[in-house]
Amino acid sequence: VVLNYFDMKQYYNLMILIVMTAIFVSICGCKNNHREELAIHPRTQSLYQEFHRPQFHFTPESKWMNDPNGLYYHKGKYHLFYQYFPDSIVWGPMHWGHAESNDLLHWKHLPIALFPDSLGYIFSGGAIVDKNNTSKLGTNDNPPIIATFTHHDIAGEKAKTNDFQKQSIAYSLDGGYEWIKYAGNPVIPNTQKIKDFRDPKVVWHEPSQKWILVLAAYDRVKFYASANLIDWEFLSDFGVEGDKRLWECPDLFPMKVEGTNEYKWVLIVSIQKNAPNDGTATSYFVGHFDGTVFKSEVENQEWLDWGTDNYAFVTWNNVPKDDGRILGIGWMSNWQYAQIVPTENWRSAMTLPRELTLVKSKSKYSLHGLPIREFQTLRGASTALNQLEIIGEKVLEGSFSASQVELDITVNLKKTTANSFGIKLQNELGENILIKFDKREGKMFVDRTNSRKHKFSEDFFKNIHSAPIAFEKEKMNIRLIIDAASVEIFINNGELSFTSIFFPSKEFSTISLFANNGTFNIINAEIHPLKSIWNKKEEEN
Ligand code: FRU
């Protein structure tokens, strides 16, 4: 009967129209959210101005990035290499991308340093300045830079050979711009056929006058020693009884305990599963390394950052002695969702470079982390607020952007009566992030479950994240550094760090302070607008 209204030609036309519409709707549907965002977002789409593009965190110019690699300082420049896939915004055949900086804030992108070759992809690792030319790959007048990395043989992986990860080196004779792969690679073969055997990083061990290499071997690390960075001798293993999680990207270095002359060794390891807030995170041990064996002197492994988004954190080699800081940087993402976050031109940023200090309190050693002091040079004209008492919610007013700002709040905990209190970032769509402190629970929370209507990943939005906090002191300091797609939270001068990324469908436009059932008592608060690092032309660096 229906066909009576049409001749056959009209019927076919209608069917074609319906099918075309369905295809069109389904194609647009997948990207629809993103298109809407681009339409409502004020920034243009020019380079570094794209929606969600961090304004003062390192990002690759385009395409996929993960771990920081090969960090060293040489001749006035901090070098940063990173796991890079130049052909896509998801993980793929790994290269080492490269950038350099005078101040660890403004970066100059450089050509790719290491490309995959017949031995495989170029996985993570470190780099050191071989000042005394122990490798003989340079000269005494022109010492080489040596990069240590894992060759990951994809064919071997597919064939399940189990020895497809091997350690190799490359050297540079011009400070790190041109790299030559060592002809005798690999320098540490995988004789035991350990499936996860990677991420070699090297440190100089003064007492034994040897290079020590640490790498991750599934649920533990392995130490090796060498006099020339080429011939390596196995020393020992270190792991945690009963912990079968996958370890990655270790780092080992001596550190002076704040305010003393005591030295300890710090071993950093990134954990690939079941971190405190799920997924991946960076942990550490403080202990003793005698040139052969590492012994932890802390009961449990500790977390360098309690948030979900600081992975593969490693430190710079060869920071000038008169500076003496331990400086490091992490990948600001999590393997649970890194490849599906809604950015189009590039994927992933690094954390702010951080200075680590080792603090002893009540016989416990812990690592504190803060953004490098140079970061303060990005502050614009600041606003100070004194003696605030928040009841309910108060929007912070001033000339700053809610997604490019630093807040430094000193809380009077004695006078704060609220059950919970905190800071809320929000946009006009009602999407928000809550940073909440709860004295009774002894915890802080970061709730990004409503940070975006369209949920691009179950894991990203699933849980409210938390960290234990001791509220027994009279005062507490909360420092928040907010960029287009991240918040880094530092409590009590770096006692606790908490990094979280987010992707609202429209920029966060307001920041408010809130108190639930009582008061949030603030001694003082400072609001610092932050400048973009990309305003400055890269060539000026
Ligand atoms: C850590 C990691 C490393 C590996 C690299 C590969 O994020 O899995 O263990 O070398 O990424 O890109």
Image (tube, helix red, strand yellow):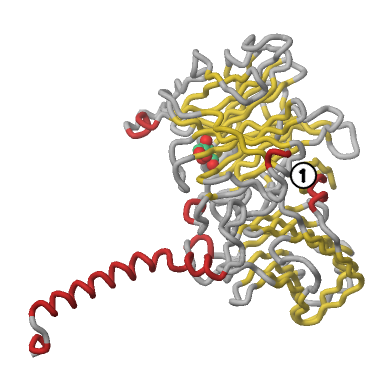
Q: Residue at left 51%, top 49%?
A: 335
* Corner quadrant of residue 526: bottom right
Residue 357: where, in percent of width, then height? 80, 41
**Three-letter residue code for mark 1:** Ser
Mark 1 nearby-residue class (10 Å; few <14, some 14–19, many ≥20): many
Residue 405 seen in this snapshot: yes
Helix, strand or loop status at disc 1: strand
Q: Residue at left 76%, top 57%?
A: 530
Q: Is residue 532 left or right of residue 321?
A: left
Pick whichever, 256 or 124, lies toward us. 124
Q: Residue at left 83%, top 32%?
A: 324
Residue 504: where, in percent of width, then height? 58, 66
Pick whichever, 429 or 307, lies toward us. 429
Q: Is residue 22 left or right of residue 213?
A: left
Q: Is residue 274 left or right of residue 495?
A: left
- The residue that mark 1 highlights is 366
Pick whichever, 249 or 474, lies toward us. 249
Residue 470 seen in this snapshot: no
